Image (cartoon, rainbow, N blue to C red):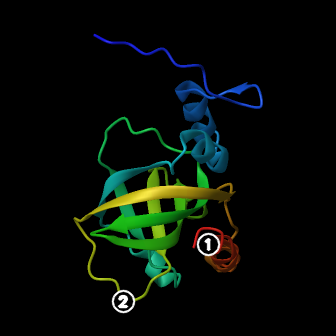
Amino acid sequence: IKLDVIELLNDNGKKISSSNIKKLISNGFIRRANYELGSIYGFGGKVIHGKGRGSRLNFPTVNISPNEKNQLMPKLGVYLIIARNNGLSMYGMCNFGYRPTFNENKLVLEIHLFKDNLDDLYDQCIRVEFLERIRDEIKFPSSKELMLQLKNDKIKCLKLQAKYD
């Protein structure tokens, strides 16, 4: 077996390693993790049925179940993402968490895509790529206040999206 030993990668003296990248992802430092990876962190998952609450809030979502049982997941919160399905790339915003406003205890990954007229995605596989962390998951006093925050999150995501176009 031929073995080539390469020098340790670093950025201004800071070691770049897989264990550090995993730590960055787990702590929500997605942009830095993507930089150190040299690509965008993401994974594949299957679109599953949710409760339909996003549609009632005027923010319809697709719920994703990761393909890998022990998938490394990012810190709970809201993210700007790209979803890829059958050659189509779609920006969106993602909530990864427990939906505390509704007192739920099941961990979910739900995505609001910034594209209209999507075909039915249920049972299809989607690759979710995390671009930037927007904020922590927050418990709101009411669904009305949550809707106002979602509008602000979407505005912020759409502005950030310009960096990636």
> Tag 2: residue type?
Asn
Position of the N terminus, as image quadrant, is: top left
Position of the C terminus, as image quadrant, is: bottom right
In front of the other: label 1 or label 2?
Answer: 1
Q: Is residue 17 visible?
A: yes
> Tag 1: residue type?
Gln
Nearer to me, 53 or 95? 95
Can you tell which mark lies on residue 117?
Answer: 2
* Crowding at mark 2 (Cα within 10 Å: few <14, some 14-19, many 20+): few
The answer to whether residue 91 is above or below residue 30 is below
Residue situated furthest bottom in the rendering: 117
Q: Name the side, left or right, on which 140 lies relative to 97.
A: right
Can you tell which mark lies on residue 161?
Answer: 1
Nearer to me, 134 or 90? 90
Q: Name the residue at 31% across, 41% down.
A: 68
The answer to whether mark 1 and mark 2 are in CB contact below 8 A is: no
Q: Which badge, 1 or 2, is on the more N-terminal residue? A: 2
Secondary element at tag 2: loop
Q: Name the residue at 53% across, 55% down.
A: 130
Q: Name the side, left or right, on which 124 lies relative to 98.
A: left
Q: Residue 134 appears in which quarter of the rendering?
A: bottom right
**Residue 71, image x, y percentages:** 39, 39
* Crowding at mark 1 (Cα within 10 Å: few <14, some 14-19, many 20+): some
**Residue 139, image x, y percentages:** 67, 60
Secondary element at tag 1: helix
Nearer to me, 97 or 17? 17
The answer to whether residue 95 is above or below residue 157 is above
Q: Name the residue at 60% across, 63% down.
A: 101
Q: Residue 102 appears in which quarter of the rendering?
A: bottom right
